[in-house]
Image (cartoon, grey):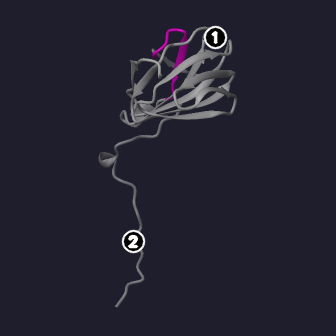
């Protein structure tokens, strides 16, 4: 005989939780060191809350990027960038130059060579990576 009883999912006990809720307040920003000295990086608390599975931060320009950073790739699973203010230009071997403005985004699989060419004088973007720790490796330009 079939049972009509429904099993209800219950949240895991505190000891079983691997990740926690993270709340970041614009009124009390937390700035951390980042890959580029000419950018500021505001930590959104995701790295600690996800136990390193993901990073989310607001990257902003102290001054515009006037010369390319050079071809490089990131050692990660993926990187996602969403432009909040201003613009930036990136170059990819398979797509050429891409200009991203406010409201635009780019998904970059780990290991994808690219070059940051230039930015507006001031800009701000949301940048996420999986996992949180993301290495940067210089590489030769594509032929």
Percent position of residue 13, x then y:
33, 51
Q: Magenta part of the protein: which range?
A: 34-44
Percent position of residue 125, x then y:
60, 26
The answer to whether residue 26 is seen in the rendering is no
Q: Nearer the viewer, residue 128 or 10?
A: 128
Find out whether residue 101 is within the magenta segment: no
Please, what secondary structure does the residue beneath circle 1 have?
Answer: loop
Percent position of residue 68, x then y:
55, 12
Percent position of residue 139, x then y:
41, 18
- Quadrant of the image containing the N terminus: bottom left
Say whether residue 10 is left or right of residue 43.
left
Please, what secondary structure does the residue beneath circle 2 have?
Answer: loop
Q: Nearer the viewer, residue 57 or 79?
A: 79
Residue density around tag 1, few if under 14, some if 14–19, many if 20 or more, within 10 Å: some
Query: In the displayed structure, would residue 119 be above or below residue 53?
Result: above
Instruction: State the separation of the CA atoms marked 2 and 1.
Output: 56 Å
Q: Nearer the viewer, residue 89 or 103?
A: 89
View extreme (left): residue: 15
Q: Residue at x 68, y 24 (%)?
A: 85
Q: Quarter of the image holding residue 38?
A: top right
Find out whether residue 38 is within the magenta segment: yes
Q: Nearer the viewer, residue 9 or 124?
A: 124
View extreme (front): residue: 143
Marked residue nearer the N-terminal end (2 or 1): 2
Query: In the displayed structure, would residue 11 be above or below residue 71?
Result: below
Residue density around tag 2, few if under 14, some if 14–19, many if 20 or more, within 10 Å: few
Mark 2 vs mark 1: in front: 1
Badge number at residue 64: 1
View extreme (bottom): residue: 1
Q: Residue at x 41, y 67 (%)?
A: 8
Residue at the spot of label 2: 7
The answer to whether residue 143 is seen in the rendering is yes
């Amino acid at each position: 005989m079939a049972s009509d009883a429904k099993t209800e999912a219950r949240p895991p006990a505190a000891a079983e939780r691997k990740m926690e809720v993270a709340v970041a307040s614009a009124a009390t920003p937390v700035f951390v060191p980042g890959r580029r000295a000419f950018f500021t990086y505001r930590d959104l608390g995701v790295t600690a809350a996800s136990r390193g599975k993901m990073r989310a931060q607001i990257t902003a320009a102290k001054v515009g990027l006037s010369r390319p950073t050079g071809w490089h790739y990131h050692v990660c699973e993926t990187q996602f960038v969403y432009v909040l203010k201003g613009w930036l230009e990136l170059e990819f071997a398979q797509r050429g130059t891409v200009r991203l403005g406010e409201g635009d985004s780019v998904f970059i699989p780990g290991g994808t060579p690219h070059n940051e060419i230039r930015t507006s004088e001031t800009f701000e973007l949301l940048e996420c990576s999986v996992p949180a720790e993301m290495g940067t490796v210089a590489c030769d330009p594509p032929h």
